[in-house]
Structures are given as structure tokens and as C-alpha cells.
Image: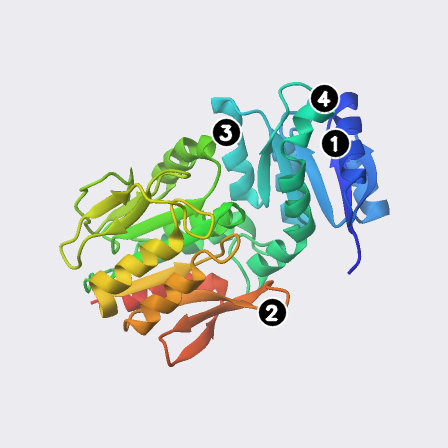
Amino acid sequence: MKNTTVLVVDDSLTMRALISGSLEKVKGIDVLGAANGADQARTMIRDLDPDVITLDIEMPGMSGIEFLEELMSSAPRPVVMFSTLTQKGAAASVDALRLGAIDCFPKPKVATPAELAKIIDSLAKTLKTASAKLAARTSGGTPGAPAGGAAEAKSKARALASEPFTWNGKLVAIGADISNTQMLFELLESMPVNCPPILVVQQIRPELADSIAAQLSEIVLPKVVKAADATRIEPGHIYLAEPEGLHMVIDRWPDGTIRLLDKPAVLGQRPSISLLYAALAKAGGRQTLGVLLGAEGEDGVAGAKAMRDAGGLAITPVLDADKIITGYEFGSANVREPVEIAKLARVILTQCRG
């Protein structure tokens, strides 16, 4: 397997040297160069054609967010952002993820090798898998891709959300990781104000949770709430599990409530997507629908199988031999069919429509 080639973009000479020097020591990664801003980065991207770009959010002139938007509208490629962990930085990080960034890492408070060493393993892993994650997101025509762009995706989402909808009683659970943020936003923006109740477990860093909840609340029609113990589950609501918090499950269905469990991590994750799916399978059976956009490791896979085995439905990624997502499929334990990413929201609403 060929090495992953990386271009580092940062206005700070010290940070460029620090990130480049640290990544050059990682097996399987080749740093092609470092750019001091958007202008230089454009030339180096054209000449060097890197697999992945690391991009600072806060840069003079054209900001990292503006440059990311330009890249994603003209020549999409995997981008991993660096940002401070302030409240403003978290909001900008979510902006970047919504535009299509694969991930957003905290910028070291002090520009030293010791500080970067705290995240270098996770950063290297993300860079090596970034191309596959972007390919998975665009298979089948994801909303927000070029040749139409974000404006067209938003228009289609709003049109779907405005269609008449009558709920048939099914409960929906969505599992995702940080690289699925763009997909998750576009999916939820397609939901009508009286949508089926939706439980969401997204594997993200805790410091991004408030900004994700706030930005979702601004663009979606249903009510967005953070999951709390003993909360009654109602249509027209989207319930967000707290990242790195307690497990979110349900006690019964229909007329169920959310329960938060203080139990060990499942497959390295808490809250666990699979544990939520398993709870739905046990409590709701045929009245449940699981949607697994993608998750690190195996979390969500076993739970989706449990939902199907209990008579429920699930939308899950299709993986190749290297566990890279090549598409999505929808169905039960016995019947599956391919489904385009651009049609996920319509499939969900069709299955939950009375």
C-alpha cells in the first residue's frame, strides 16, 4: 500500500515545522511540503497533488474556513483541520466539519514536539484513512458535493422537510463519527417539524458538542435536545447523546423514555451505538429503524444486526476487504438493497410515514 502524501498549511513557521517534522517520522506518511497560506497552498496542491491536507482554521487573509469552502466547491479532497479549543474555535471547527472536513484536531497550546505528541497517533491514523472516508461519503452522490454544491443540497433538504408527513410510530436511531458530520447535518435538515423521534450517538470530541447542538438547532425544523435520563421520547424531537458521557438506551417502545447508563465502554466507545441499537431491538423490534452512517471500529455493526434480527430495519455501510465503506444498503435480516447517500433521508421518512 502506498504512503499517504500530506501538505501542511499553516501561517506559523513554527507550526509548519512542528507538524511536518512530527508527521515525517510516522511510517506510511510522506510530507510533500508546507504552505504559509491559501495562495501558496493553491500552487502546491496543483503541483504536488497531495492525498490529504492539514489546514489551520485561523489564518490572516483568506481563513482556513474560506479556503476549505473553496476547495470543496472546486476540487474536493480530504482536509483535516487544526483549531484552538476555545468556544469560538469549537464553533469554527463545526463549520469546517459541515463544509466537509474529515476531522478537526486541537491545536497545541504550546508549539513543542511534546504537545503535538499527545495527538500525533490519532492524527496519523486520520490522515491515513481520510481518502477512504471522503470516498465513502461521495459514493452514490452525497448532498453537498460539487456540481450542485451546498446551496443545492440545502434546497433539496428543505423541500423534503416541507413535504406532508404523518408518523407511523417507528423510532429512529442514528450512529455516526466525526467524519460524518456533513452527512448528519444534511440528513437531519431533511426532517419535517413533526419527524419521527430520532436518537443520535455521534462519536466526537466533547468540546464540539455544544456547537453541534447549537448549529443543528439553527437549521433543522424539529426540536434538538441533549439526551437526559427519564426524558419522554416524542415525535418532532432529535435527541443527542453526550459524547464521552453515559450510554443512551430506551426502556420500552412505544411510549418509551430515554435511560442513561453508567456502564463500561462497549468496543471502546461510551456512549455506544451498538448498545443503543440493541436496546431498540429489545424494546421495539419491528417498530425501529437504525441508521449507521459510519463509526470508528466495530461500534454499531453488531447492534444493527440485532435490530434486523429482531424484525427491525437498518441502513448500514457496505465494507470492502479493507473495511473501507463503498456504499450503503437498506433492509431487514433477509432482504437488502443498495441505497444512495443522497436518498437516505427519503428512505427514512418513507419507512416512518403512516
Instruction: Locate residue 319, reporting x and y percent.
Output: 56, 67
How packed mark 2 is, by other alpha carbons closer than 10 Å (few <14, some 14-19, many 20 or more), is: few
Q: Residue furthest left?
A: 255
Tag 4: amino acid = Thr
Q: Residue furthest top?
A: 110
**Figure quadrant of the N terminus:** bottom right
**Snapshot quadrant of residue 18:** top right
Quick one: 13 or 191, which is closer to the camera? 13
Q: Residue furthest bottom?
A: 334
On the image, numbered disc 3 is attached to which residue?
90
The answer to whether the residues at label 4 and label 2 have Cβ atoms under 8 Å apart is no
**Local SS, label 3:** helix
The answer to whether the residues at label 2 and label 3 have Cβ atoms under 8 Å apart is no
On the image, numbered disc 2 is attached to which residue?
320
How packed mark 3 is, by other alpha carbons closer than 10 Å (few <14, some 14-19, many 20 or more), is: many
| Lower position in the chain sequence, tag 2 or tag 3 | 3
**Local SS, label 4:** loop
Q: CA distance from mark 1 to mark 2?
A: 32 Å
| Lower position in the chain sequence, tag 1 or tag 2 | 1
